[in-house]
Image (cartoon, grey):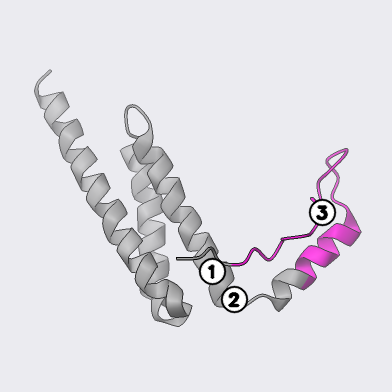
Amino acid sequence: MSSPPNPAHGVDDPFEGDGAPDPAAMDELRRQLADADPSVVIANHAYGLFELAAVYLSTQPPRLAEAQLAIDALAGLCEAVGPRLGEATSPLVEALAQIRLAWVQLSSASASDEASL
């Protein structure tokens, strides 16, 4: 699967330098975002939620509550607009199933570890 286009590609960081946003760079970013396909932008955010959940699950010990929040947000997004995300729908639904399975496995392992203490 190829990466979705980045609407900010080629735009200078609007917060470069002293940390104050550069109005011209912000205007360019807004223009590019307005020209982007919303399904691509939303799918990018959904992939970000998947990655966030994966990061929380990969910590030692896994941060299950934080991961669950990201997973629930991804599920809500998939359920609310999934079919309208075009070709990203199927990979996102699969990713959601995978991250849910990982959460269940880690949750079970964590419960087993606590029970053996």
Between the C-alphas of marks 2 and 1, the distance is 6 Å
Q: Earlier in the sequence, mark 2 or mark 3?
A: 3
Between the C-alphas of marks 3 and 1, the distance is 22 Å
Q: Which is more toward the observer, 73 or 2?
A: 2
Callout 2–callout 1 Cβ contact below 8 Å: yes
Residue in the picture at 54% in, 69% down: 42
Q: Residue furthest top?
A: 117
Residue in the picture at 83% in, 41% down: 19
Mark 1 — residue?
42
Please tell me whether mark 3 sits on a helix, a strand or a loop: loop
Q: Residue furthest left?
A: 116
Mark 2 — residue?
38
Please tell me whether mark 1 sits on a helix, a strand or a loop: helix
Between the C-alphas of marks 2 and 3, the distance is 22 Å
Amino acid type assigned to the residue bearing label 2 in the image = Pro
The dot on residue 6 is none
Q: Residues within 10 Å of mark 3 (few under 14, many from 20)?
A: some
Residue 54 lies in quadrant: top left
Please tell me whether mark 2 sits on a helix, a strand or a loop: helix
Q: Residues within 10 Å of mark 1 (few under 14, many from 20)?
A: some
Mark 3 — residue?
12
Residue 86 lies in quadrant: bottom left
Residue 22 location in percent, x, y? 88, 53
Amino acid type assigned to the residue bearing label 3 in the image = Asp
Residue in the picture at 20% in, 46% down: 104
Residue 67 lies in quadrant: top left
| Magenta residues (range) | 5-31
> Which secondary structure is most common in the magenta stretch?
loop
Vertical order, 117 against 51 (above or below): above
Q: Which is more toward the observer, 14 or 69?
A: 14
